[in-house]
């Protein structure tokens, strides 16, 4: 071997070993620059505008009026006191508004799709299009919040749930439009296409706070952070078990703090996304980046997921001090395929306690075996201090491609007490394992008999 190459290899390996420590200073920098929203002193109580918390009266006009009054006063706080408030249609935010849902208050949305027309500009599984309005929708707003200890219920378990078996043609049409770069104005869906709306969507917004509320029974994704930045989500809880009920979906999102969240979802708890396929790759200037997830309780399908729609790229994700409070299929799941392109890099995960899962840590560049021509780059992924009681399938899975290997993976202080399959590691290079135990720890060797 060439001596200079050997020296370079040794220096590179040393640098990789030095750079896989959890970068707390970078986390602090992200958290410190996230700005919380600030609101004017104006307040309006919906009861004073004629709202009735009787679970029957349609309060749509009252909530629209409250938002209009806030706009007239350059913002303010809309107070929703104790009661059950039926709303037949969406809440559309304006800037500088805090929707404060007090303890004992519940907003219960209708499940009539007609109530969520006319269509708005939104995104559906990584493709921009016009569709039913999300139940709570903010577009191009700043300084906005949903706070309080109340509940938002999306009534997603009946009519909306029935859309799942009918969505295939609309879903495929949206993806065809993505792949053929159809003009956005022509991507109109809504009635007849059965693409369910998100519960809450912040689109092209900044300085966002979602705090302490409870989210139940969403039609589709619960909290979609789309093309937004400077976001704080903390102290919220979930019970939303319908199809595709992801808890939090940052997509093309920047500077995000997710902390002290108690999940109970029918799908991923946190799913970090960045657009799909051709459209996503055209937006590489706006990857999802600088996302901190900490002190959360996971329960649902998967804990933290990156992908599969991530074509603009995902980088600088920091997950720490989280645990499960119930079943998870997979703990940490990085998934992409050869349709996506883009990159996943600089992912740091530490201090995670998992109980029973199907797979503990799973990284695949060949999700569903789909696609060709646009393999993703996965590199610089670091796991440390991970415990898991049981993996009914695999402890650790790493799946790259022969001509596009997953690179620079470190696993430090990992203990999986029981696993059907310990490690499946293919098409990866520079995988560093230190103090990794799967199954019973070996003791000192016994003497020969």
Image (tube, rainbow, N blue to C red):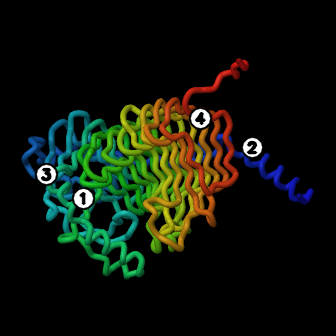
Q: Do the residues labelled 2 and 3 touch (CB within 8 Å)?
A: no
If the image is split into quadrants, where does the C terminus sit? Answer: top right
Mark 3 to mark 4: distance in Å?
52 Å
Mark 2 to mark 3: distance in Å?
58 Å
| Tag in front: 2 or 3 | 2
| Tag in front: 2 or 1 | 2
| Tag in front: 4 or 1 | 4
SS at mark 3 in the image: loop
Disc 4 or 1, which lies upstream in sequence? 1
Q: Are marks 4 and 1 in contact (CB under 8 Å)?
A: no
Say which of 116 and 396 sits in front.
396
118 relative to 438, above or below? below
Say which of 152 and 262 sits in front.
262
| Tag in front: 1 or 3 | 3
Which residue position holds label 4? Answer: 414
Say which of 229 and 279 sits in front.
279
Q: How crowded is mark 3: few (under 14 residues within 10 Å), some or many (20 or more)?
A: many
- Residue 377 in picture, x, y percent from top left: 59, 62
SS at mark 2 in the image: helix
Mark 1 to mark 3: distance in Å?
14 Å
Q: Do the residues labelled 1 and 3 touch (CB within 8 Å)?
A: no
The residue at the point 60 percent across, 54 percent down is 426
| Tag in front: 3 or 4 | 4
The residue at the point 50 percent across, 52 percent down is 334
Disc 2 or 1, which lies upstream in sequence? 2
In the image, is 134 to the left or to the right of 38? left
Which residue position holds label 2? Answer: 18
Asked whether residue 326 appears in the rendered view, the answer is: yes
Which residue position holds label 3? Answer: 59
The residue at the point 18 percent across, 47 percent down is 108
């Amino acid at each position: 071997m060439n001596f200079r190459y050997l020296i370079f290899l040794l220096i590179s390996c040393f640098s990789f070993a030095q750079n896989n420590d959890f970068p707390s200073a970078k986390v602090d920098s992200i958290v410190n620059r996230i700005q919380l929203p600030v609101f004017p002193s104006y307040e309006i109580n919906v009861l004073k505008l004629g709202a009735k918390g009787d679970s029957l009266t349609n309060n749509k006009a009252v909530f629209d009026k409250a938002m209009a009054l806030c706009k007239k006063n350059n913002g303010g706080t809309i107070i929703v006191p104790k009661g059950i408030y039926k709303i037949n249609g969406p809440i559309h935010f304006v800037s500088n508004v805090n929707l404060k849902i007090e303890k004992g208050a519940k907003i219960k949305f209708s499940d009539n799709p007609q109530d969520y027309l006319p269509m708005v500009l939104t995104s559906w599984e990584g493709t921009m299009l016009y569709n039913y309005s999300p139940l709570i929708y903010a577009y191009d707003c700043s300084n906005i919040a949903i706070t309080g200890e109340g509940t938002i219920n999306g009534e997603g378990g009946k009519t909306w749930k029935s859309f799942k078996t009918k969505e295939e043609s609309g879903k495929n049409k949206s993806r065809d439009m993505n792949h053929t770069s159809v003009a956005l104005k022509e991507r109109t869906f809504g009635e007849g296409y059965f693409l369910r709306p998100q519960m809450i969507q912040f689109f092209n917004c900044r300085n966002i706070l979602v705090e302490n509320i409870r989210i139940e029974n969403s039609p589709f994704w619960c909290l979609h952070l789309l093309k937004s930045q400077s976001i704080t989500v903390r102290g919220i809880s979930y019970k939303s078990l319908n199809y595709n009920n992801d808890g939090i979906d940052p997509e093309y999102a920047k500077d995000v703090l997710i902390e002290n969240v108690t999940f109970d979802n029918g799908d991923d708890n946190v799913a970090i996304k960045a657009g799909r396929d051709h459209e996503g790759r055209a937006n590489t200037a706006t990857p999802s980046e600088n996302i901190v997830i900490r002190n959360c309780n996971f329960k649902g399908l998967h804990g933290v997921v990156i992908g599969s729609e991530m074509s603009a790229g995902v980088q600088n994700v920091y997950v720490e001090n989280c645990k499960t409070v119930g079943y998870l299929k997979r703990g940490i799941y990085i998934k992409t395929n050869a349709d996506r392109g883009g990159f996943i890099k600089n992912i740091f995960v530490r201090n995670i306690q998992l109980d029973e899962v199907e797979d503990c840590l799973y990284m695949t560049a060949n999700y569903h075996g789909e696609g060709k021509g646009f393999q993703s780059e996965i590199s610089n992924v670091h796991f440390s201090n991970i415990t898991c009681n049981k993996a009914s399938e695999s402890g650790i899975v790493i799946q790259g491609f022969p001509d596009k290997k997953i690179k620079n993976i470190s696993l430090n202080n990992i203990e999986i007490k029981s696993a059907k399959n310990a490690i499946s590691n293919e098409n990866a290079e520079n995988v560093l394992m230190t103090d990794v135990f799967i199954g019973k720890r070996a003791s000192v060797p016994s003497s020969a008999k």
